[in-house]
Image (tube, grey):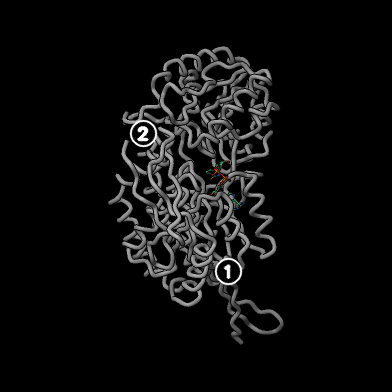
């Protein structure tokens, strides 16, 4: 397998090594071996990046010149598109994406999303005339403006790194903010390449900065606590999301959180092609490492055995379809790290102890290489109070839960601390009635796409707060200013 180039920091317009030239190993999840080096930012590097972003926001006209921003970001988009193959390679070797997954959600989804955000820019209402009001005996003409919130700290995870980086960075820059991006330690190069391409596009110094670090918390905590940073946009686990709120509280930081999920995939008893729809619930794409992935399959008890048989066939048919590095149609590779593999295997053990029945998979596969391979796994006879039904596993594990009727399906779907996504299959009107009762942010009816770059994405309950992508995703990075002009 190939190697990856060294990842650098991008601070105040310079692509440069970390202080003291510190680096750390970038690990290839397919092999468990070193695939490249990444810059290991010091606290001083992070401080410089924050100051660069602050100065660029306060002392330049970046936030005041929307036309120039849009032009520059279009150039940046073109450069990203021109580097698509390089980005695919990074997604494969750094994030462990199979080619099928790398090309779709990992890279093309991110590039399409970037385009969508650029198109949504003109949908944002930057200035609104609220008319004249007579109060206290005189007239006031009123305006409501949207303005950039300021310096943004963008903290991102490793599962779909380009997609999440783009969702935050491009929306924040379009809004007129300046940004410090802190990628996950496991996927540094997908952040570093964005810095390199920004330098090539000719970004003004300090407008966008990238700091990679081997430490999970150091740079992110600095950004969260620093009073020069106005907003933290975070995607990651619910546990760290709570810490971010806590650490941001002393400076009353605006926090925008995209967190975990345990979404439901509900098949109604009248779903056309019932068996095919059930088979489509397999959690295999990118080894299940997706936050909005519907990982709880809810099937009617009246057709439960039929569903179990369909799943048995589907998993048997998939046994040799995953873990192939060079196969263009392959959608499932390894997990990101040894740590994640251990976490997933631990949940598989918990499921067995809880009394769920393992229908397929359940094992690590060291015979497939030294990387982090876990079999596509399916538990049946699961009840929704089991830990494997309540906690986010973030691996290729589907749990199957029977329900009595539509009300029961809705109750089970909502019986979760999470509320990120979900899918319902059946007669369209009936399915629409069901999704309207599910407390989650992104719902699909009969396989429709609710997660695209021009639609708002985000969670209810402990899946987070705020919305990313679409017009709403740009507005998330703005403050609202009301102006009253005395008119009589
Ligand atoms: P994580 O929460 O461990 O880390 C996310 C990011 O936060 C990383 O960059 C990490 O270095 C940083 N971080 C860790 N501790 C921090 C701290 N104390 N202060 C500031 N930053 C800190 O999550 P992960 O393991 O990288 O990603 C997996 C999780 O992300 C899953 O729970 C998944 O559901 C969630 N996720 C959510 C979405 C979404 O849009 N809702 C998308 C992708 C992933």
Q: What's the CA distance linking mark 1 and mark 2?
A: 41 Å
Q: Position of residue 427 (x, y in %)?
A: 52, 27
Q: Residue at x 60, y 44 (%)?
A: 237
Query: For mark 1, does the 10 Å Cα neighbourhood hold few (<14), some (14 to 19), or many (20 or more) residues?
Result: some
User: Residue placed at 51% from the left, 50% from the top?
Assistant: 214
Instruction: Tell me if I can see residue 427 in this picture.
Output: no
SS class, disc 1: loop
Residue 137's x, y, as percent?
A: 70, 84
Query: Which sits in the foreground, 184 or 468?
Result: 184
Secondary element at tag 2: helix
For disc 1, the marked residue is 228
Q: Quadrant of the N terminus?
A: top left
- Give the number of the mark in front: 1 or 2: 1
Q: Is residue 436 left or right of residue 76?
A: right
What x and y, as percent, mark residue 220?
57, 55
Lower sequence index among marks 1 and 2: 2
The residue drawn where x is 50% and y is 47% is 185
Q: Quadrant of residue 285?
A: top left
* Above or below, comparing residue 90 to residue 195 in the picture: above
Taking the image as drawn, is residue 41 in sight? yes
Along the line of sight, which residue is nearer the eye, 343 or 415?
343
Q: Pointer 2: what residue?
A: 100
The image shows residue 263 at horizontal and vertical percentages of 58, 34
């Amino acid at each position: 397998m190939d190697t990856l180039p060294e990842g650098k920091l991008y601070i105040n317009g310079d692509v440069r090594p970390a202080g003291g030239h510190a680096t750390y190993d970038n690990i290839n999840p397919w092999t468990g071996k070193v695939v490249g080096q990444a810059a290991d930012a010091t606290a001083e590097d992070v401080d410089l990046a924050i100051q660069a972003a602050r100065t660029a926001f306060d002392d330049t006209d970046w936030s005041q010149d929307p036309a120039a921003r849009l032009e520059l970001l279009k150039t940046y988009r073109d450069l990203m598109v021109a580097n698509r193959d390089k980005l695919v390679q990074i997604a494969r070797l750094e994030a462990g994406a199979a080619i099928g997954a790398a090309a779709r959600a990992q890279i093309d989804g991110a590039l399409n999303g970037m385009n969508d955000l650029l198109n949504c820019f003109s949908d944002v209402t930057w200035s609104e005339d609220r008319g004249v009001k007579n109060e206290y005996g005189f007239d006031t003409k009123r305006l409501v403006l949207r303005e950039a919130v300021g310096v943004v700290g963008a903290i991102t995870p490793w599962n779909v790194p380009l997609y999440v980086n783009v969702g935050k960075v491009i929306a924040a820059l379009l809004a007129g903010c300046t940004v410090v991006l802190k990628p996950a330690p496991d996927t540094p190069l997908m952040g570093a390449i964005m810095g390199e391409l920004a330098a090539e596009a000719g970004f003004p110094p300090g407008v966008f900065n990238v700091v990679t670090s081997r430490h999970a918390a150091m740079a992110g905590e600095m950004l969260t606590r620093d009073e020069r940073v106005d907003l933290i946009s975070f995607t990651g686990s619910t546990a760290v999301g709570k810490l971010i709120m806590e650490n941001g509280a002393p400076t009353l930081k605006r926090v925008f959180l995209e967190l975990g999920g345990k979404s439901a995939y509900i098949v109604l008893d009248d779903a056309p092609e019932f068996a095919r729809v059930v088979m489509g619930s397999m959690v295999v794409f990118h080894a299940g490492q997706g936050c909005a992935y519907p990982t709880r399959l809810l099937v009617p008890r009246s057709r439960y055995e039929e569903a179990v048989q369909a799943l048995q066939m589907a998993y048997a048919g998939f046994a040799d379809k995953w873990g192939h590095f060079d196969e263009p149609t392959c959608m499932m590779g390894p997990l990101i790290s040894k740590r994640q593999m251990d976490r997933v295997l631990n949940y598989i053990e918990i499921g067995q102890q809880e009394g769920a029945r393992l229908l397929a998979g359940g094992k690590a596969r060291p015979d497939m290489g030294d990387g982090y391979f876990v079999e596509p796994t399916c538990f049946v006879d699961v009840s929704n109070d089991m830990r494997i039904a309540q906690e986010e596993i973030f691996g290729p594990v589907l749990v199957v839960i029977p329900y009595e009727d539509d009300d029961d399906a809705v109750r089970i779907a909502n019986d979760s601390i999470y509320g990120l996504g979900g899918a319902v299959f059946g007669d369209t009107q009936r399915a629409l009635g069901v999704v309207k009762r599910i407390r989650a942010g992104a719902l699909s009816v009969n396989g429709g796409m609710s997660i695209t770059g021009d639609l708002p994405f985000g969670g209810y309950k402990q899946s987070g707060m705020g919305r990313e992508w679409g017009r709403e995703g740009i507005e998330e990075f703005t403050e609202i200013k009301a102006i009253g002009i005395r008119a009589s």
